[in-house]
Image: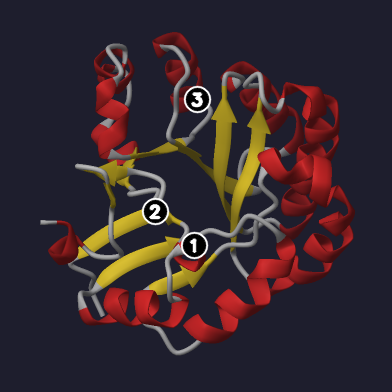
Amino acid sequence: MKPDFVDFHAHLDLYPNLADAIRICESSKTAKLAVTTTPRAFARNKELAKGSSFVRVALGLHPQLVAERASELALFADLLPQTRYVGEVGLDASPRHYRSFDNQKEVFGTILDLCAEAGDKVLSLHSVRCAKHVLDMVEAGLPTGRGAVVLHWFTGSASEARRAVDMGCYFSINERMFASAKVGAVLKVIPPDRLLTETDGPFVERNGVPLQPCREQQR
């Protein structure tokens, strides 16, 4: 069944009612990648979305949670065969999370190795203040043809975006990104067929209200 809308990165399990959020995606024909932030969150998401034609669940280990959840990496490896989608994973070099950056790189490197071995994964990657590091690690750890990379809410430079395009990466963009003056320069170097839409709901807000699971609710 063909979707009417695409949201390639959203945290459905962070809305008040996950089951309702999935039903809304189904009724509105919104193709949704439901990313998770920890491996332990994956099972419930997958169970509730198992009958959905439009929601796919990604297995994640968010870099902002690595300091507390690195021990779940073994669980991540166990669960990986259950899904084609991986996210949210990556690196975060913002001041609040930089202390765990070395640990983040270890975890992300292992995730890339696991995905390269599996050979068929689609990854939604976080890369706050460290686009070069993420691209370096992807280039080293995920050989061409062993997976597909989508850079979520990309905040790197135009030259870094051009490098990512040359590497075969895709980009998922949301409306909040257009508040940045440099987004225009970045988008100019990205071919239209490498762009996907996302909400990153419920983190992105409009008029102080989190974006909802489908477009009709956001009007």
Q: Are marks 2 and 1 in contact (CB under 8 Å)?
A: yes
Q: Residue at 34% across / 38% down in the picture?
A: 194
First in sequence: mark 2 vs mark 1: 1
Tell me which amino acid carries mark 2. Pro
Instruction: Write down the residue under mark 3.
Output: 164
First in sequence: mark 2 vs mark 3: 3
Rendering coords of residue 168 (x, y %):
49, 34
Rendering coords of residue 79 (x, y %):
76, 70
Q: Give the structural element (helix, strand or loop) at label 2.
A: loop
Instruction: Write down the residue under mark 1.
Output: 14
**Which numbered dot is residue 202?**
2
Question: For the residues marked 2 and 3, what is the alpha-carbon distance in whole angstroms?
Answer: 27 Å
Of the 4 image quadrants, the one containing the C terminus is bottom left
Note whether 37 is above or below 172 in the view shown: below
Is 21 on the left-hand or right-hand side of 109? Answer: left
Rendering coords of residue 121 (x, y %):
61, 57
Along the viewing direction, whichever of 189 and 36 lies nearer the viewer = 36
Rendering coords of residue 187 (x, y %):
28, 22
Q: Which dot, 2 or 3, sits closer to the camera?
A: 2
In the picture, residue 40 is in which quadrant? bottom right
